[in-house]
Amino acid sequence: MTTAISRARLLARDALLEACYRTGATRPDRALRERLTIVTFHRVLPAELAREYPIDTLAVTTEELAWCLRFLADHFTCATLRDASRAFASGEAARRPWLAVTFDDGQRDNFEHALPVLGRAGVPATFFVPVDAVDTGEPLWHDRLAWAVARGGARDRTAAAALRAALGVDGEAPAAALVRRALDHAKRLDDRARAEFVARWEARLGGPARPAWDGMMTWTQVRALAAAGHEIGSHSMSHAILTSCDDRALERETRASRDLLRRRTGCDVESFCYPNGDHDARVLAAVRRAGYARAVTTRWGPNDRSAPEFALSRCDIQGRTSRSARGTLSPARLAWRLTGRSAPRSR
């Protein structure tokens, strides 16, 4: 009975969202006319690999990305963050509202899978690169931990049980819940403690577990993105939680990452992305001093003309939150989310 009632509510929600979309109340080209919208993607993978990837909130399939880009191109004037923010700030008129597509974390799948989809859609984007990871090819800490928990935990149930006990995760909870709890716990640690936590549990769960298909972009690939007309921005040097950095480390994460990106790509680097969205007045001041023109957060929503240029909001796009109760990709639902309204919780 509960399931039937819940499904009925979801279907009623979908009907309401469809009505709002059809009448124009949530059509972005109307509702966001005086806004700058910035959307965020992370991993872009073929469906079979997306099912394998252990952080379900960070991956879209290539088909989902193509669908999203078609929707965005129909309703917005799409440009890089650099170009869209300049045009919006200057009051430049456009037939549809300004929008920037951004990708975080510099993963190889952005080059292999996202770039061709962007090319077919004719949509330019901004790619935020964590410089150390591109230099070394080493995975970011959240991927190391997630792969270790998901794959190692399936192999070594004793170690997985110890991690569940350490984090207070119920033994009956699914593996995805353990991955989420481990990541949330690690985010609250300072950089040294986080590195120790990841290394300790990676070792206990059987060692590095990233599959061969996963990896970071190379500098050759980053330069190819720029040559194709996309913007390259900084995602810091090490993807550190910047509010926990001392002044010397913060200078490296902001200024040194910009300097190295400029040397390696030959491009100016104007845009910065706060890892995990974490920033405060000290971090913001360091980004400004480093010579950037703008910075983006993980705070949800479109930006009006009063939005601070070093704390711009973005809208994280996921395939699962763009689907109707029947599981189909829904323009009405995506429109509802982008226009800043709070749809009833669906899952």
Image (cartoon, helix red, strand yellow):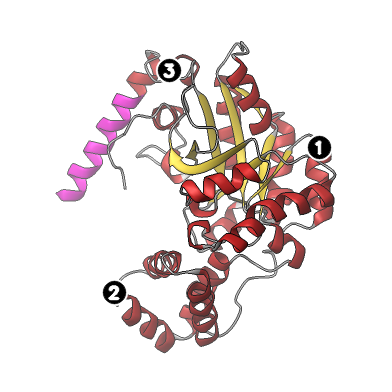
| Residue 234 among those drawn in magenta | no
For the point 63% across and 13% down, the residue is 92
Q: Is residue 102 above or below residue 286?
A: above
Question: Reading the chain from its start, which is encountered first: label 2 or label 3?
Answer: 3
**Dominant secondary structure (helix, strand or loop) of the stretch shown in magenta:** helix
Q: As rendered, which of 100 and 1 lies closer to the eye? A: 100
Looking at the rendering, the stretch of residues picked out in magenta corresponds to: 1-17
- Residue name at image x 50 percent, y 87 percent: 204
Q: Which mark is residue 172?
A: 2
Q: Position of residue 286 (x, y in %)?
A: 59, 48
Return the residue at label 3. Answer: 31
Judging by the rendered image, the residue that carries numbered circle 1 is 228
Question: Is 151 on the left or on the right of 105, as rendered?
Answer: left
Identify the residue at horizontal 78%, vertical 39% (top origin): 268
Q: Residues within 10 Å of mark 1 (few under 14, many from 20)?
A: few
The amino acid on which the numbered mark 3 sits, given as a three-letter code, is: Ala
Q: Secondary structure at mark 3?
A: helix
